[in-house]
Image (cartoon, helix red, strand yellow):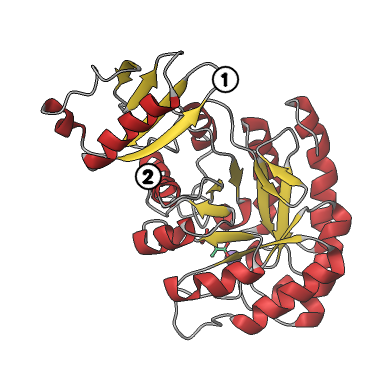
C-alpha cells in the first residue's frame, strides 16, 4: 500500500509513520516529492486492521495497491526508469543495442567480434562465461577465464559488458567484471539468486522465464528491487508455446503490457526468441516498432562453427545491415539509434 503524507507533513511525522510500519513488520520505501512525500509499504496489510495508522499526524491517505508488484509497478513511480550504464541510457529516447556471441570461446574471435559490433553501433557487448546448457555434455563456458577475456574486449572497445550469473556463489565474481548482470530465463524464479543480485549495485538484465506470465516476471523484478537494487532492464526472449517452427514464441504483446504496468525499461532478444538468424531482422524491427527500449542480439564471426547457438547468430555483416535498417524504424516511433 501507499501512505500519502499531507503536503505539510514534517520529516519527523514521516519518520514516525515509517517507524510504526517497520515495527509492524512492513518494509518501507519513502519517496520524497517536491510537494508530498509518499511511503511505499510492503507487507501484510491485514496487520493494519488492529493498528490503524490513518490517524497518525501527517497522514493524508492510504491507498491499497492491487498489483502484487509494488516497486516494479507504476503506482509508486510513474516516470520511466532509465538505467544508466556508463554514458549509455537504457529506457531513454535512444534504442540501445547489445550484441556479441552467445558464449566467449577464445580471446581472438571475441575481441574481433566486439570491435565489429561496436563499429556497427552496438553500445553494450554480450557474452556468456557461465553457460550451463540443456545437456551437461555440451560446452559449459570458460567461466572466470571468459570474464577475463571480456575485460580485455572492454579495454579494446570501451563497450560496457553484459554477462550472465547462474549461481549465487559467483555473484561477487561476475559483478567485478560485468557492467550489467544477466539473469537468464531459466533462473527467473531462482529467488535466492534474484535476492543476491539485488544486493549488488549493478544494473540487472532480467530475462523472462520460458513459462512465466508477465506478472510472474514483474514479481521476479520485485525480488531484486526489494533487496535494494532498482536498476532493472526486462528482456522478452520468447516463451514456450505449442508452436515448434521457432525455438520459442516471441510475445510482442508483452512490450506494451509491460509499458502499461511497469516503469522499468524492456528490451527484446530476437535471437533466443526464434532460434534462427533468418528471423532476427524482422523481429528486431517489430520489437522497436512495438515500443521496446533496445535489443540484445547474438553475433558470431563463424556461426557454422559456434560452440553455442550458432543457428541463431548473425554474421557481423548481417548485423551491420540490420542496424542500418533499424534506424528509420526507430525514427518512425520517435526514437533515435
Ligand atoms: C543467453 O542470453 O545467453 C541465454 C542463455 O538466454 P536465455 O536465458 O534467454 O535462454
Ligand atoms: Mn545463446
Q: CA distance from mark 1 to mark 2?
A: 29 Å
Asked whether mark 2 and ligand 1 are closer than 8 Å, the reply comes as: no
Secondary structure of the residue carrying tag 2 is: helix
Classify 261 as above or below 273.
above
252 is higher (above) or lower (below) than 227: above
Does 123 sit left or right of 136 as displayed?
right
Question: Based on the displayed image, in which of its 4 quarters is residue 70 positioned?
Answer: top left
Which residue is drawn at the image coordinates 45% and 79% (left, top)? 135
Q: Which residue is mark 1?
A: 34
- Which residue is pictured at 43% across the width and 33% down the height? 30
Work out whether residue 239 or residue 41 is closer to the camera in this orientation and state it: 41
Ligand 1 falls in which quarter? bottom right
Residue at 37% across, 44% down = 219
Mark yes or no: residue 31 visible: yes
Residue 98, given in percent of the width and then of the height, sits at: 71, 54
Is disc 1 placed on a helix, strand or loop?
A: loop
Counting from the top left corner in percent of width and height, residue 257 is at 48, 30
Q: Residues within 10 Å of mark 1 (few under 14, many from 20)?
A: few
Asked whether, in this view, residue 61 is left or right of residue 201, the answer is left
Question: Which of the two discs, 1 and 2, sits closer to the camera?
Answer: 1
In this view, the residue in front, 147 or 130, is: 147
Q: Residue at x 44, y 27 (%)?
A: 11
- Residue receiving disc 2: 219
Q: Nearer the viewer, residue 169 or 237?
A: 169
Residue found farthest to the left: 50
Using the rendered view, name the quadrant where residue 112 is placed. bottom right
Can you see residue 67?
no
Amino acid at each position: 500500500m501507499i501512505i500519502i503524507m499531507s503536503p505539510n507533513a514534517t520529516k519527523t511525522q514521516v519518520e514516525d509513520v515509517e517507524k510504526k510500519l517497520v515495527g509492524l513488520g512492513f518494509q518501507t520505501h519513502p519517496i520524497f516529492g517536491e510537494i508530498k512525500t509518499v511511503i511505499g509499504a510492503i507487507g501484510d496489510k491485514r496487520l493494519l486492521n488492529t493498528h490503524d495508522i490513518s490517524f497518525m499526524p501527517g497522514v493524508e491517505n492510504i491507498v491499497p495497491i492491487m498489483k502484487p508488484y509494488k516497486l516494479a509497478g507504476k503506482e509508486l513511480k510513474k516516470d520511466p526508469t532509465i538505467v544508466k550504464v556508463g554514458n549509455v541510457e537504457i529506457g531513454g529516447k535512444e534504442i540501445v543495442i547489445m550484441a556479441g556471441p552467445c558464449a566467449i570461446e577464445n580471446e581472438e574471435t571475441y575481441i574481433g567480434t566486439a570491435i565489429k559490433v561496436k563499429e556497427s553501433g552496438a553500445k553494450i557487448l554480450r557474452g556468456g562465461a557461465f553457460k550451463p546448457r540443456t545437456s551437461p555434455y555440451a560446452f559449459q563456458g570458460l567461466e572466470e577465464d571468459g570474464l577475463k577475456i571480456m575485460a580485455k574486449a572492454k579495454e579494446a572497445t570501451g563497450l560496457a559488458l553484459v554477462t550472465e550469473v547462474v549461481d549465487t556463489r559467483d555473484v561477487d565474481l561476475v559483478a567485478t567484471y560485468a557492467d550489467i548482470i544477466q539473469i537468464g530465463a531459466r533462473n527467473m524464479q531462482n529467488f535466492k539468486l534474484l535476492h543476491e543480485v539485488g544486493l549488488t549495485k549493478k544494473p540487472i538484465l532480467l530475462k523472462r522465464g520460458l513459462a512465466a506470465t508477465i506478472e510472474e516476471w514483474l514479481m521476479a523484478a520485485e525480488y531484486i528491487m526489494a533487496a535494494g537494487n532498482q536498476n532493472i532492464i526486462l528482456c522478452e526472449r520468447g516463451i514456450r508455446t505449442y508452436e515448434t517452427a521457432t525455438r520459442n514464441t516471441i510475445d510482442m504483446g508483452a512490450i506494451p503490457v509491460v509499458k502499461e504496468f511497469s516503469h522499468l525499461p524492456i528490451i527484446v532478444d530476437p535471437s533466443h526468441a526464434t532460434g534462427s538468424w533468418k528471423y532476427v531482422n524482422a523481429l528486431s524491427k517489430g520489437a522497436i516498432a512495438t515500443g521496446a527500449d533496445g535489443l540484445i542480439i547474438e553475433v558470431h564471426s563463424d556461426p557454422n562453427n559456434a560452440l553455442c547457438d550458432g543457428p541463431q547468430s548473425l554474421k557481423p555483416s548481417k548485423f551491420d545491415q540490420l542496424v542500418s535498417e533499424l534506424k528509420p524504424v526507430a525514427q518512425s516511433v520517435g526514437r533515435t539509434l
